[in-house]
Amino acid sequence: MTLLQSLLVIAVLIAVSAFFALAEISLAASRRLRLRQMADEGDPRAERVLRLQEQPGPYITVVQIGLNGVAILGGVVGEGSLTPYFARFFELWFTPETSQGLGFGASFVTIIAVFLIFADLFPKRLGMSQPERLAMVLAAPMQVLITALMPVVWLFTRSTDLLFKLLGLHAQRDDRITSADILAMAEAGAQAGVLALREQQVITNVFELDTRLVSSVMTSRDRIAWFLRDDAESVLRARIVAEPFSAYPVCRDDIDHVLGYVDAKEMFQRVLSGQPLSFDAGLTLHKALVIPDRLSLTEVLEQFRQAHEDFAIVVNEYSLVVGVITLNDVMSTVMGDLVGPSDEEQQIVRRDEHSWLIDGLTPIQDVQRALDIDTLPHAEEYETLAGFLMVMLRRVPKRTDTFSWGGYCFEVLDVDSHRIDQVMVTRTPA
């Protein structure tokens, strides 16, 4: 075989090897969601690739047969055709025996380098850059090869399946998408500039609804504005002016005996139309939705949907009212600072690069996000910054109490009747 013929054979072998390498990586790297979208749009090639991903055994068998066969032939052809020429070149400086060994080594390295670059690295990087498009193009010829080599493919595939079975392994590809996968994709999208950072945070907040309890978002008991059933109109007017909310619980005797709630919009309409603010004069008392304080925010949304309500009373295991929550509270948790309060009303105020002023009732997840802390000790024992301080100090905090953890110093600035109002958090030097 002449040198030109040998080089032509090597070029053909490289092309065949590149084809199989491209087929392998494009199928493995193809995104199932993208393929499903194209299949739903009517592309039959995408449907073919999806079927191959579901049963990849025969496909991979053909790829490996092709790659290994080409590798063996390439070594034989390359060594036999290039070694004499390299040997003659080295004979200019070395003895014939030494030149023969050096020629073999140079031929081996050259063939390996050429195959590595043109038959492996380049096609695989190409396949990674456009996996779905290339997989759809290569699926048809690969299907032909699978059919042509069916006896051999069947033998190797069944042998591999038997090995999986003996080892107790799953041979099927697991394409289930978890919340962690979606969050990772959102983070990657934000880093690539496809998603804005705020949009990524909204996606993260949605998945946090399952882990955040209603008590981390509700208006706590001591901040509830409520009415007695027999309050005078002057009292009602004064309270809605002093404490404007969307709804007010209506109670008998005390806050733990809730009769229902009154909608603030209805009260405003009656005031504007000159009607009296009195439950005896037509002011509607709505039945209150009562939920336990151990529900997650996802469960709260489901309760709102089933009851067709957007306001609920939160009670503990002793049937005592511990807070109230509205649909807007939950949605504000999802949307974050896109619909958050003004700077003066925020629970977390950043004073400078290394310090924050935080309300004690701030949900601990919001504190972690603001301070960029992944985990906190005993996280299952509290839901607010005040709870974290109590767990860490092992007592009810007092004004000026301080402790350090995780590179941050926590200092209690203000306490009102055992309730922690303000906490100064300072990042300590490393």
Image (cartoon, rainbow, N blue to C red):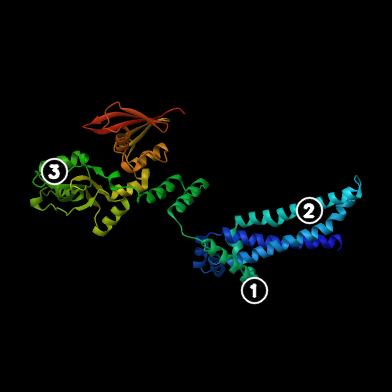
Which SS class for mark 1?
Answer: helix
Q: Amino acid at mark 2?
A: Phe
Task: Name which of mark 1 and mark 2 comes first in the sequence.
Answer: 2
On the image, the x and y values in percent for residue 211 come to 35, 49
On the image, the x and y values in percent for residue 384 come to 31, 40
Task: Name which of mark 3 and mark 2 comes first in the sequence.
Answer: 2
Residue 340 in which image quadrant: top left
Quarter of the picture containing the N terminus is bottom right
In the visual, does 242 lie left or right of 191? left
Mark toward the viewer: 3 or 2:
2
Residue 408 in which image quadrant: top left
In the visual, does 336 lie left or right of 294? right
Inter-mark Cα distance, 3 to 1:
86 Å
Q: Measuring 60% from the left and 60% from the top, which residue is drawn there?
A: 26
Location of residue 307 with respect to 278 vertically, above or below:
below
Inter-mark Cα distance, 1 to 2:
34 Å
Q: Which residue is label 3 attached to?
A: 236
Which SS class for mark 3?
Answer: helix
Location of residue 394 with respect to 74 vertically, above or below:
above
Q: Measuring 57% from the left and 58% from the top, which residue is drawn there?
A: 29
Q: Which residue is label 2 attached to?
A: 108
Inter-mark Cα distance, 3 to 2:
93 Å
Q: Would residue 272 be visible to someone looking at this image? A: yes
On the image, the x and y values in percent for residue 430 come to 47, 29
Q: Amino acid at mark 3?
A: Leu
Residue in the foreground of this view, choosing between 120 and 346:
120
Q: Would residue 137 be visible to someone looking at this image? A: no
Q: Which residue is label 1 attached to?
A: 151
Q: Amino acid at mark 1?
A: Pro
